[in-house]
Image: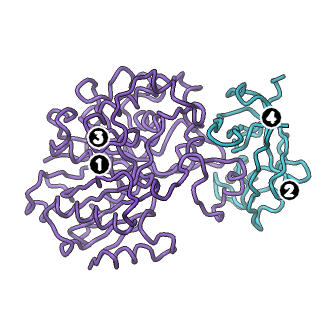
């Protein structure tokens, strides 16, 4: 069965701290890497996808054009849909649609950032955000930041379902088991449940080790038409299904224990004609341990409220458990460039499907993978993007 | 006297003046839709449930329960971010104040209090009624 589009190029920048590189330069380097991986050149690219991390985004409306100009792109299709960390997962789906519609044949997607080099207080200071957002005056006086917003979700999940800090810790333990094999990972030490729950409390109930790393760098993807894919000397990684859905605060009638994955997940599974039990490997956005747990439930890997038991005892560890997750070490241990985790999630899923993951974490017969990301705050407004990829 | 957290001023708009003026007078207003008979928060000139513009602001009685909370520790003055479910139905983002933060639990009954922002605007917050 021919898919409407294929991922034929991937690249994850090896840097985790880019003091000596500009933001635009990082975008160019990841583009070069993904094109080289695919065996294509910049002249082949006829569509470009970027989001709010692009150099020039602080000049409203013109940043993407500055980026295209800098890269020297000559393209006939452009998509700048911004949905924070889930953007790049959504971009793969949008590129597949554009290719199927005949708008382009070779789409380049880039992500880059240098929050470490810029010294940003990522977790404990408010993100730069527009005061024009309708809710801003009703929320900003109370000091919502990234860590305490995710803390609200974790605390409520614990209250409703009895989820424990030890269960959440298993998600970090699994990430650390994987990261020990990744020479580029920021944190390569294997940690235990005790290490996680004994690490300093950041925003109750989340400890330091429940939080992802802050890293510089980025990544890029090349999405191509079936005709182009067949000319390239690469495993055929097909886009089988996708879904995208926002979550809102519902006029204050909130449920902080669920995410937009309750809509994006079933849509992607239905389009692909597969079920959670068919998935051999999953890249699940891990900004925090609780992010993974809630998304696994909402995607249907276990029932709502069962996530704590599901992730325990090494189930997410490659070679040990039934559902290997984030075998590159994820955002919790490897890389979370520009505070946006969606790109690296797609990259590791493609590595798994190509059988190019590290041998210690490569999943046997990995022919079907899921990628899921949340962009924004789990507790409140966010975008959820799901992709299902298959090796043909 | 322990150090107090500085509350950022809300950047108010022409459609929310009544809400913030009422706060300065000690009243918390919430949205109420007369078309679908549902309450909502935050207030706005239409109903987020049914998009009717037949809406009004009604005073909340000031009681509620803690829906969820998180104490941010890695700052100069730790504070408690929370969602409180008002007795009228909707939940609102807020702070739990005037208590031992580490005794706060989900389900605690709370009552409305006001704390002044840096520029003197009264901001609605909540304090537990059962702690002593
Ligand atoms: Zn209504």
Q: Is mark 3 within 8 Å of ligand 1?
A: no
Marked residue nearer the N-terminal end (2 or 4): 2
Q: CA distance from mark 1 to mark 2?
A: 54 Å
Labels 1 & 2 near each other (Cβ < 8 A):
no
Task: Please determine whether, in this image, residue A88 is positioned above or below residue A153.
Answer: below
Q: Position of residue A274 (x, y in %)?
A: 26, 39
In the rendered image of this protein, which colour is used for chain A? Answer: purple
Q: Residues within 10 Å of mark 4 (few under 14, many from 20)?
A: many
Q: CA distance from mark 2 to mark 3?
A: 50 Å
Give the residue number, with chain letter if any, for mark 1.
Answer: A271
Q: Residues within 10 Å of mark 3 (few under 14, many from 20)?
A: many
- Callout 1 secondary element: helix
With A298 as the anchor, is A388 left or right in this view?
Answer: left
Q: Are marks 4 and 3 on the same chain?
A: no
Give the residue number, with chain letter if any, for mark 4.
Answer: B127
Q: What residue is at 46 percent from the left and 21 percent from the top?
A: A194
Q: What residue is at 65 percent from the left and 42 percent from the top?
A: B75
Task: Please determine whether, in this image, residue B59 is positioned above or below residue B96.
Answer: below
- Callout 2 secondary element: loop
Marked residue nearer the N-terminal end (1 or 3): 1
Q: CA distance from mark 4 to mark 3?
A: 44 Å
Label at residue A328? 3
Q: Residues within 10 Å of mark 1 (few under 14, many from 20)?
A: few
Give the residue number, with chain letter if any, for mark 2.
Answer: B120
Q: Position of residue A245 (x, y in %)?
A: 45, 51
In the rendered image of this protein, which colour is used for chain B? Answer: cyan
């Amino acid at each position: 069965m021919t898919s409407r589009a294929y991922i034929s190029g991937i690249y994850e920048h090896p840097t985790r701290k880019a003091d000596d590189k500009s933001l635009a330069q990082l975008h160019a380097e990841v583009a070069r890497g993904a094109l080289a991986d695919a065996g294509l050149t910049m002249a082949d690219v006829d569509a470009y996808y970027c989001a709010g991390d692009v150099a020039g985004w602080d000049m409203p409306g013109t940043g993407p054009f500055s980026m295209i100009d800098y890269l020297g792109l000559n393209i006939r299709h452009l998509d700048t849909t911004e949905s924070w960390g889930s953007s790049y997962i959504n971009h793969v789906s949008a590129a597949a649609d554009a290719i199927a519609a005949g708008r382009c044949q070779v789409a380049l997607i880039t992500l880059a950032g240098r929050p470490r080099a810029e010294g940003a207080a990522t977790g404990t200071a408010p993100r730069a955000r527009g005061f024009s957002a309708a809710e801003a005056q009703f929320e900003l006086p109370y000091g919502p930041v990234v860590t305490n917003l995710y803390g609200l979700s974790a605390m409520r999940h614990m209250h409703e379902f009895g989820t424990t800090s030890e269960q959440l810790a298993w998600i970090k333990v699994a990430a650390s088991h994987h990261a020990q094999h990744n020479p580029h990972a920021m944190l390569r030490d294997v940690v235990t449940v005790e290490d996680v729950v004994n690490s300093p409390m950041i925003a109750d109930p989340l400890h330091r080790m429940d939080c992802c790393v802050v890293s510089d760098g980025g990544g890029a993807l090349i999405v191509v038409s079936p005709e182009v894919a067949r000319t390239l000397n690469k495993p055929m990684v097909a886009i089988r299904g996708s879904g995208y859905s926002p979550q809102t605060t519902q006029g204050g009638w909130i449920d902080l224990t669920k995410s937009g994955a309750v809509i994006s997940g079933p849509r992607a599974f239905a389009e692909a004609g597969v079920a959670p039990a068919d998935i051999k490997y999953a890249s699940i956005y891990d900004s925090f341990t609780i992010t993974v747990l809630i998304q696994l439930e909402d995607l249907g890997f276990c029932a709502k409220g069962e996530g704590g038991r599901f992730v325990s005892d090494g189930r997410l560890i490659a070679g040990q458990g039934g559902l290997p997750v984030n075998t590159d070490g994820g955002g919790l241990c490897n890389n979370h460039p520009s505070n946006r985790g969606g790109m690296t999630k797609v990259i590791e899923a493609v590595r798994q499907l190509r059988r190019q993951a590290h041998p210690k974490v490569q999943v046997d017969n990995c022919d079907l993978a899921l990628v899921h990301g949340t962009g924004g705050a789990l507790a409140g407004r966010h975008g959820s993007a799901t992709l299902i990829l298959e090796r043909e | 006297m322990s150090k107090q957290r500085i509350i950022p001023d809300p950047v108010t708009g022409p459609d929310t003046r009544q809400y913030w003026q009422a706060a300065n007078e000690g009243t918390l207003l919430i949205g109420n839709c007369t078309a679908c008979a549902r309450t909502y928060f935050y207030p706005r000139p239409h109903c987020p449930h049914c998009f009717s513009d037949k809406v009004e602001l009604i005073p909340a009685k000031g009681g509620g329960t803690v829906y969820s909370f998180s104490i941010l520790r890695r700052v100069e003055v730790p504070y408690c971010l929370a969602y409180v479910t008002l007795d009228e139905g909707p939940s609102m983002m807020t702070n739990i104040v005037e208590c031992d933060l580490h005794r706060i639990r989900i389900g605690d009954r709370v009552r409305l209090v006001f704390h002044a922002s840096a520029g003197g605007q009264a901001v609605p917050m909540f304090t537990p009624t059962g702690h002593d």
